[in-house]
Each structure stands twice: as C-alpha cells, then as structure tokens.
C-alpha cells in the first residue's frame, strides 16, 4: 500500500511540475512578445522622427532653390507662379501615412505618433497641404507679396 501511495504522489508531482513548466513558459512568451512589440514601436518612432527631419530639409532646400525675392519696383496685379520644384517624398513616415502642412512661416509634419515643426526661413507666406509622394512646391508672387505653396503633384 505504501508503494501505491508513493507512486500516486509521484504522479501528481509530475503533473504539477509539468503544469508549472507550461505556465512559466507561457508567461515568458508573453513577456518576450510584449518586449519585442515595444522595441518595434520605439524603433518606428525613432525612424519616423529621423525621416521627418530629412523631409524638412528636403522641403527647405526645394523652397530656397526656387525662391528669389522680387524687388519692390516690380508690380503685378495678378498672382503669378514664378517658379516651382517637384520632389519625390516618401509615402509613409515610419510605418504610417503622414501630412505636410504649410502654415504661417513653418512646416508641420504629422503622422500617427510623430509631430514635427520646422522653420523654412524664407520671408514669404506659406500655405498648402501634401500627403507625401510626388509633391510640388510653388513660388507665387502678386500684389507685392511672396507666397510659397505645397500640393501633391
């Protein structure tokens, strides 16, 4: 009888041991999966912020390339396009679609978890919106005012 009790207890011990092993394995898998997800999100945000800075530089260079202020002695009654530049920007920022908004004297780049504002440094009114991809930046002049606009090409 003692041999059966020992064998039965030993069998229960095996079941408990295996159950605990499976439980700890599942907990470990959950911890590893959530850690990998966090690392992936952090990497996408880091990459997205770096790309946003690059996009700001590309837009600033394109605007400076086409902009040449007109002297005050030139008068035009209608607003005319004085020059433009077409640039190819990425479709996504990080892993999300984004938008570029010209407001006042700054450029706002926004995506799901990314928001970046940069100054162009041009004495002109900025306006327009682009969603990345092929983008047209125009210099407009009329009635003594300079404007830079952005739109999808």
Image (cartoon, helix red, strand yellow):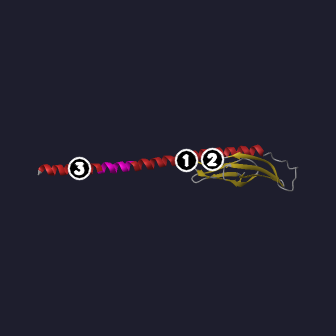
Residue 17, can we see it? yes
Residue under numbered circle 3: 13
Residue 102, can we see it? no
Disc 2 or 1, which lies upstream in sequence? Answer: 1
Question: Gap between marks 3 and 1, in whole Å?
Answer: 46 Å
Find residue 106 and report its horizontal and vertical position in percent: 69, 51
Of badges 3 and 1, nearer the viewer stands 3
Find residue 1 and report its horizontal and vertical position in percent: 11, 52
Magenta highlight on residue 20: yes
Question: Gap between marks 2 and 1, in whole Å?
Answer: 12 Å
- Magenta stretch: give its range: 19-28
Residue under numbered circle 1: 44
Q: Residues within 10 Å of mark 3 (few under 14, many from 20)?
A: few
Would you identify the image quadrant in which residue 47 lies? top right
Outermost residue to the left: 1
Q: Residues within 10 Å of mark 1 (few under 14, many from 20)?
A: some
Of badges 2 and 3, nearer the viewer stands 3
Of badges 2 and 1, nearer the viewer stands 1
Disc 3 or 1, which lies upstream in sequence? Answer: 3
Label 1: which secondary element: helix
Label 3: which secondary element: helix
Q: Is residue 68 left or right of residue 54?
A: right
Mark 2 touching mark 3, by CB under 8 A? no
Q: Main secondary structure of the magenta part?
A: helix
Q: Residue at x 48, y 49 (%)?
A: 37
Q: Residue at x 44, y 48 (%)?
A: 33
Q: Residues within 10 Å of mark 2 (few under 14, many from 20)?
A: many
Question: Gap between marks 2 and 3, in whole Å?
Answer: 58 Å
Find residue 134 and report its horizontal and vertical position in percent: 69, 48
Residue under numbered circle 2: 52
Q: Is residue 13 left or right of residue 47?
A: left
């Amino acid at each position: 009888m003692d041999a059966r009790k020992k064998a039965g207890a030993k069998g229960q011990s095996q079941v408990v041991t295996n159950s605990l092993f499976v439980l700890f394995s599942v907990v470990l898998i959950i911890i590893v999966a959530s850690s990998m997800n966090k690392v992936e999100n952090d990497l996408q945000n880091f990459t997205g912020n770096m790309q946003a800075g690059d996009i700001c530089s590309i837009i600033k260079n394109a605007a400076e390339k086409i902009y040449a202020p007109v002297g005050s002695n030139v008068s035009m009654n209608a607003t005319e396009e004085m020059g433009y530049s077409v640039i190819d920007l990425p479709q996504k920022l990080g892993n999300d679609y984004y938008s570029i908004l010209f407001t006042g004297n700054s450029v706002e780049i926004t995506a799901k978890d990314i928001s970046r504002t940069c100054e162009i440094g041009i004495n002109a009114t900025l306006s327009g919106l682009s969603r990345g991809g092929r983008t047209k930046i125009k210099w407009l002049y009329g009635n003594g005012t300079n404007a830079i606009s952005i739109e999808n090409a």
